Image (cartoon, grey):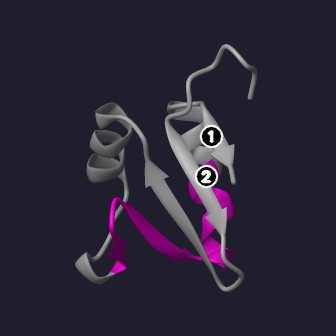
């Protein structure tokens, strides 16, 4: 990510799960339209996914939204 690119998604690797948090409404809208997230996966503003699924999901998000920041 370049310094001029805005952050759309924040990612925290918590070991067995990865927490993905949309920063802007457009990112949340993209998630709602493209990702099947169960209600129990949401933790505050972000959602948790198994680390084995996260790589492909984040690749798709990067291609569509850009601006992924790993915390």
Q: Nearer the viewer, residue 5 or 56?
A: 5
Q: Which mark is residue 68?
A: 1
Q: Which mark is residue 58?
A: 2
* Residue visible at 56% across and 23% down in the picture: 6
* Residue visible at 24% across and 77% down in the picture: 39
* Residue visible at 62% across and 66% down in the picture: 54
Determine whether 61 is above or below 32 in the image. Answer: above
Q: Which mark is residue 52?
A: none
**Which one is in front in this view, the residue at disc 2 or the one at disc 1?**
1
SS type, badge 2: helix
Image: magenta residue range: 41-58
Percent x, y of residue 57: 57, 57
Percent x, y of residue 14: 66, 77
Determine whether 15 is above or below 34 in the image. Answer: below
Near mark 2 (Cα within 10 A), the count class, few <14, some 14-19 or many ≥20, is some
> Image quadrant for the N terminus?
top right
């Amino acid at each position: 990510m370049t310094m001029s690119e805005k952050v759309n998604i924040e990612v925290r690797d918590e070991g067995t799960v990865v927490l993905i948090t949309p920063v802007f409404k457009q990112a949340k809208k993209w998630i709602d339209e493209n990702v099947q997230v169960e209600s129990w996966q949401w933790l505050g503003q972000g959602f948790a996914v198994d680390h084995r699924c996260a790589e492909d999901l984040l690749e798709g998000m990067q291609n569509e939204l850009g601006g992924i920041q790993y915390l």
